Amino acid sequence: MDMRLFLISNFSIGVIVYLLITCVLGSIMYLMSLWLQFIKGLSPLYAGLYMLPAAVFALIAFLVMPYLLTRFIARVIMFSGLIFTTISLILPSILDYRDLLSNTMLYILDCLV
């Protein structure tokens, strides 16, 4: 990588903002796992299973994003990503689907074995 890119202010600001967003999202996932374990009373396994759909959808979004960027402007994609992230952070506090999730995950694990 050419280090002269950091002389461009837009590039430097973009890298710093990306670093901050990554740190914040990592902290949110860490604190959410603690919240699920200590406040909601879930075991570490159930807390991980509870957070698994978010990881799966993040993977799908990562794969679909290049296609979406050719169809829509970046502002629309960023706003919709913000909305989906907000919904995904609010839903675990509202829903209690522990039994359905555990049964589904056990079925999937049983099929894999």
Image: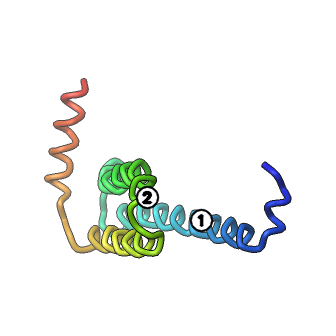
- Residue at 27 percent of width and 70 percent of height: 91
Q: Nearer the viewer, residue 78 or 19?
A: 78
Spot occupied by residue 93 in the image (x, y as percentages of width and height) = 28, 72
What is the CA distance from the residue labelled 2 to the residue labelled 1? Answer: 28 Å
Residue placed most toward the observer, 36 or 16 = 16
Q: Is 69 situated left or right of 10 in this image?
A: left
Amino acid type of the residue that numbered disc 1 sits on in the rendered structure: Cys
Residue at label 2?
70
- Circle 1 sits in a helix, a strand or a loop, which is it? helix
| Crowding near the residue tagged with mark 1, few <14, some 14–19, many ≥20 C-alpha atoms within 10 Å | few
Q: Quadrant of residue 92?
A: bottom left
**Which residue bears the numbered disc 1?**
23
Q: In this view, does 102 lie above or below 109?
A: below
The amino acid on which the numbered mark 2 sits, given as a three-letter code, is Thr
Q: Do the residues labelled 2 and 1 touch (CB within 8 Å)?
A: no
Q: In this view, does 19 lie to the left or right of 71?
A: right
Task: For mark 2, give the secondary structure.
Answer: helix
For image coordinates 30% across by 63% down, the residue present is: 41
Mark 2 against mark 1, which lies toward the viewer? 2
x%, y% of residue 104? 17, 44
* Relative side of 32 to 42, left or right: right
In the current view of this chain or complex, which residue is farthest to the top? 113
- The label shown at residue 76 is none
